Image (tube, rainbow, N blue to C red):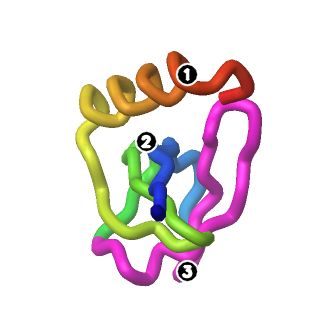
């Protein structure tokens, strides 16, 4: 099973961005997602941004992960 994790874009570079996942910030390849901007939420799988998502959807997904995992 594969899981993509939502994160908030806090800096954008050429073809990658710094993503905030709460406890961790990581540079992620965003070449698969069009027009990535600071404050966007994107789903990240295996180091790649795979799609944008709305803030309410991202926050709801993050809340579900927190319910399932104490370390999230």
Viewer-nearest of discs 1 and 3:
1
Q: Position of residue 26 (x, y in %)?
A: 71, 56
In this rendering, would 57 be left or right of 10?
left
Viewer-nearest of discs 2 and 1:
1
Mark 2 vs mark 1: which is more N-terminal?
A: 2
Residue at the spot 58% in from the left edge and 64% down from the top edge: 17
Q: Which residue is mark 3?
A: 14
Q: Residue furthest front?
A: 1
CA gap, disc 1 and disc 3:
31 Å
Counting other residues with Cα less than 10 Å from the Cα at mark 2, is it few (<14), some (14-19), or many (20 or more)?
some
Mark 3 vs mark 2: which is more N-terminal?
A: 3
Q: Which residue is mark 2?
A: 39
Q: Is 18 located above or below residue 66 in the figure? A: below
Residue 33: say if magenta: yes
In this rendering, would 53 be left or right of 6?
left
SS class, disc 2: loop
Q: Which residue is mark 1?
A: 66
Residue 51: say if magenta: no
* Labels in figure, total: 3
Contact between labelled residues 3 and 1, with CB atoms less than 8 Å apart? no
The label number, if any, that marks residue 19 in the structure image:
none
Of 9 and 13, the residue lying toward us = 9
In this rendering, would 52 be left or right of 8?
left
Residue at the spot 75% in from the left edge and 41% down from the top edge: 24
Of 14 and 48, the residue lying toward us = 48
């Amino acid at each position: 099973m594969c899981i993509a994790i939502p994160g908030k874009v806090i800096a954008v570079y050429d073809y990658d961005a710094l993503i905030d996942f709460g406890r961790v910030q990581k540079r992620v390849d965003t070449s698969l997602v069009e027009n990535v901007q600071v404050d966007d939420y994107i789903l990240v799988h295996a180091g790649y941004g795979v799609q944008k998502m709305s803030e309410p959807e991202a926050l709801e997904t993050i809340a579900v992960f927190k319910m399932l995992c104490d370390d999230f």
